[in-house]
Image (cartoon, rainbow, N blue to C red):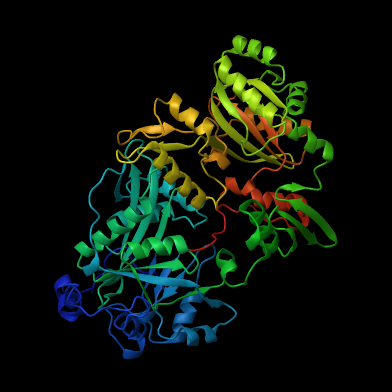
């Protein structure tokens, strides 16, 4: 079956003809106060009129309609007269795509025709009736919304899709959507930087198949997980609704996973109501998690889960030993390996101890001829003060710490140095004072002697809106980071955050002018609200070589190395520390999980894939 054209084809009726054929468009625009109340769980008008259209023999200007969205096809079930034809259409899904068949009259019958290949998608459909749509009041939000314009913007959209584990859209198709009347793709563009920070796609059902209901739908809503501005997703949703309202459409539908409570709460707040519309999909590796039942990885954190899911995909047995701490055992062909996230029993105790003690790490790397900062013990305050006087700016950190705890960066005066050293001493923690190195915080992942991923990490920042205090902005930003990372990233409301705010020239209770960007942490650690930006493709060969040499010197098979660099595409560097249990999930879409399992079980190694599998729907 051919996919739907990207623009209106011959034979589709004009809008005036559609109005005559679909008087329901007019009746649905009556005053909301005079229309009978609708049940949010079962709309008497939407249910039978949508799901029962096939049985009622409604005529469409296009039969067996599909629309190619780039990431897969929308298959409009109400335009099919025969369930077998519909099942065949779903089974024609291309490899690497995710087709969606919806508005089905008889989903149970459809599934019975191919039970080994099809499944009922566990998502809800929500609808915004256009007569209930109310444009949001204008406010300063720091971004604008418009259509995609260039190939570079398409690449940025696909970067966001990759970060959200979604299927990308081919460049030529995305650019063709600029002229389409059927498919609309919008992007949110940050005013200050011009960066693409969100995207959404919409389908006009009238253009697609002459829908007498005058409907439309929202698809592929995605916001950059690193975006600091609030309200991007809701603004894209409402902007698309306004677009379809201007066309005279009666409603806009969207699909959301049944357990996505945060998204459901947002949509209901925006005025969407749940309607009895169902989706059927073809079983494939992209949506496997939706039809294979509960996984033992569900209780694990994201760093362990990504590895367990990849192992299960290859048929490797998984036994979760301690979900709270990330311990599990993988077994295949008589070989069993116990892991704690990316740390495995193949890492020796010696290699682990070299990474855990930052003094030892530095000495080993320096002996190997690699660039490392100078360092003295924090226990000797007099020596530390002399060290500060000699270098001007220093870092104080525990010798054995992780996730940025206890680290104070860019100390420039003796009083702050004394407090930082004293804080470690009072906790009974050994510490070091190290020269502060200016530059970008670069994490490089090395697995089995190969650089697999590289990313620049940036400290937490807030963007002022002219209304909220610095404290409120930090709390809101922290909530968004936690939501985007499964609770792994939050901005601590501690003395270090207050120090960063103070040095930026503000207090926690100030209300900065709209658009003001304030860095609220000195360190770029993800667990303290930092963001991560993939630079694998632009990594300078000298940095990759240094990372491999460092892993070899430490004699560790899987490691995350922290560099400070002027830029990822330049050769200069300093290695700050090594992490024996690096968070591989932070580096998607790079194939960190695949290369990790390749290393543990090389007999299961798969070809390199250009894009990651998608966890599932975007809403």
Within the image, what quadrant is residue 556 found in? top right
Q: Nearer the viewer, residue 469 or 47?
A: 469
Q: Is residue 78 above or below residue 561?
A: below
Q: Quadrant of residue 509?
A: top left
Q: Residue furthest front?
A: 426
Residue 216 or residue 400, whichever sits in front: 400
Q: Nearer the viewer, residue 175 or 495?
A: 495
Residue 91 percent across, percent down from the top left: 51, 75
Residue at the farthest bottom position? 56
Q: Quadrant of the N terminus?
A: bottom left
Based on the displayed image, in which of its 4 quarters is residue 554 positioned? top right
On the image, the x and y values in percent for residue 319 come to 75, 62
User: Closest to the observer: 562 or 54?
Assistant: 562
As drawn, which residue projects farthest toward the right? 334
Q: Position of residue 395 (x, y in %)?
A: 61, 23
Q: Quadrant of the C terminus?
A: bottom left
Residue appearing at x 56%, y 49% in the figure:
589
Q: Position of residue 87 (x, y in %)?
A: 48, 81
Along the horizontal axis of the image, is 405 left or right of 55?
right
Camera sees residue 551: yes
* Point 52% across, 44% down: residue: 490
Vertical placement of residue 612 versus 399, above or below: below
Instruction: Evaluate whether residue 71 shows in this view.
Output: no
58 up-or-down from 445: above or below: below
Residue 538 lies, with reference to residue 218, above or below; the image says above
Horizontal side of residue 261 vs 190, given as left or right: right
Q: How many marks?
A: 0
């Amino acid at each position: 079956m051919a996919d739907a054209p990207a623009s209106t084809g011959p034979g589709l009726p004009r809008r005036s003809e559609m109005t005559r054929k679909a008087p329901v468009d007019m009746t649905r625009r009556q005053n909301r106060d005079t229309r009978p109340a609708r049940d949010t769980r079962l709309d008497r008008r939407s249910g039978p009129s949508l799901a029962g259209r096939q049985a009622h023999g409604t005529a469409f200007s296009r039969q067996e309609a599909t629309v190619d969205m780039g990431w897969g096809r929308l298959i409009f079930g109400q335009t099919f007269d025969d369930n077998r034809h519909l099942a065949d259409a779903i089974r024609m899904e291309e490899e690497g795509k995710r087709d969606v068949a919806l508005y089905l009259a008889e989903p149970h019958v459809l599934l019975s025709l191919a039970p080994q290949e099809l499944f009922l998608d566990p998502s809800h459909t929500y609808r915004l009736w256009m007569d209930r749509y109310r444009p949001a009041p204008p406010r300063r939000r720091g971004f604008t919304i418009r259509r995609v314009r260039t190939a570079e913007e398409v690449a940025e959209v696909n970067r966001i899709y990759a970060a959200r584990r979604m299927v990308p859209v081919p460049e030529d198709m995305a650019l063709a959507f600029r002229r389409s009347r059927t498919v609309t793709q919008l992007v949110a563009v940050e005013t200050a930087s011009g960066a693409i920070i969100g995207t959404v796609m919409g389908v006009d059902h009238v253009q697609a198949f002459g829908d007498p209901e005058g409907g439309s739908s929202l698809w592929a809503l995605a916001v950059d997980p690193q975006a600091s501005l609030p309200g991007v997703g809701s603004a894209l949703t409402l902007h698309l609704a306004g677009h379809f309202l201007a066309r005279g459409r009666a409603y806009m539908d969207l699909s959301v996973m049944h357990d996505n409570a945060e998204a459901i709460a947002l949509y209901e707040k925006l005025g969407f109501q749940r309607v009895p519309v169902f989706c059927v999909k073809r079983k494939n590796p992209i949506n496997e998690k939706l039809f294979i039942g509960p996984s033992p990885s569900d209780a694990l954190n994201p760093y362990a889960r990504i590895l367990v899911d990849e192992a299960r995909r290859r048929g490797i047995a998984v036994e979760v030993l301690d979900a709270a701490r990330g311990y599990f055992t993988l077994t295949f062909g008589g070989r069993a390996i116990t892991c704690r996230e990316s740390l495995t029993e193949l890492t020796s105790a010696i290699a682990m101890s070299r990474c855990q003690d930052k003094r030892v790490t530095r000495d080993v790397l320096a002996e190997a001829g690699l660039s490392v900062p100078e360092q003295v013990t924090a226990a000797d305050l007099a020596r530390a003060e002399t060290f500060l006087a000699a270098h001007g700016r220093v870092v104080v950190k525990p010798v054995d710490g992780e996730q940025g705890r206890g680290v104070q960066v860019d100390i420039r005066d003796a009083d702050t140095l004394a407090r930082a050293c004293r804080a470690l001493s009072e906790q009974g923690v050994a510490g070091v004072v190290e020269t502060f190195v200016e530059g970008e915080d670069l994490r490089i992942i090395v697995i089995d002697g190969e650089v697999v991923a590289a990313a620049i990490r940036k400290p937490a920042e807030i963007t002022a809106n002219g209304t909220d205090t610095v404290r409120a902005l930090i709390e809101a930003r922290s909530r968004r980071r936690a939501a985007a990372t499964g609770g792994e990233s939050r901005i601590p409301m501690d003395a270090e955050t207050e120090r960063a705010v103070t040095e930026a020239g503000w207090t926690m209770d100030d209300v900065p002018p709209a658009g003001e960007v304030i860095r609220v942490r000195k360190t770029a650690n993800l667990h303290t609200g930092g963001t991560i930006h993939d630079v694998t493709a632009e990594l300078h060969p000298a940095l990759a070589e240094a990372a491999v040499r460092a892993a070899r010197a430490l004699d560790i098979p899987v490691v995350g190395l922290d560099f400070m660099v002027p830029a990822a595409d330049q050769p200069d560097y300093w290695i700050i520390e090594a992490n024996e249990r690096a968070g591989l999930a932070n580096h998607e879409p790079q194939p960190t999980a695949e290369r990790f399992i390749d290393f543990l079980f090389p007999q299961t190694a798969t070809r390199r894939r250009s894009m990651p599998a998608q966890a599932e729907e975007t809403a």
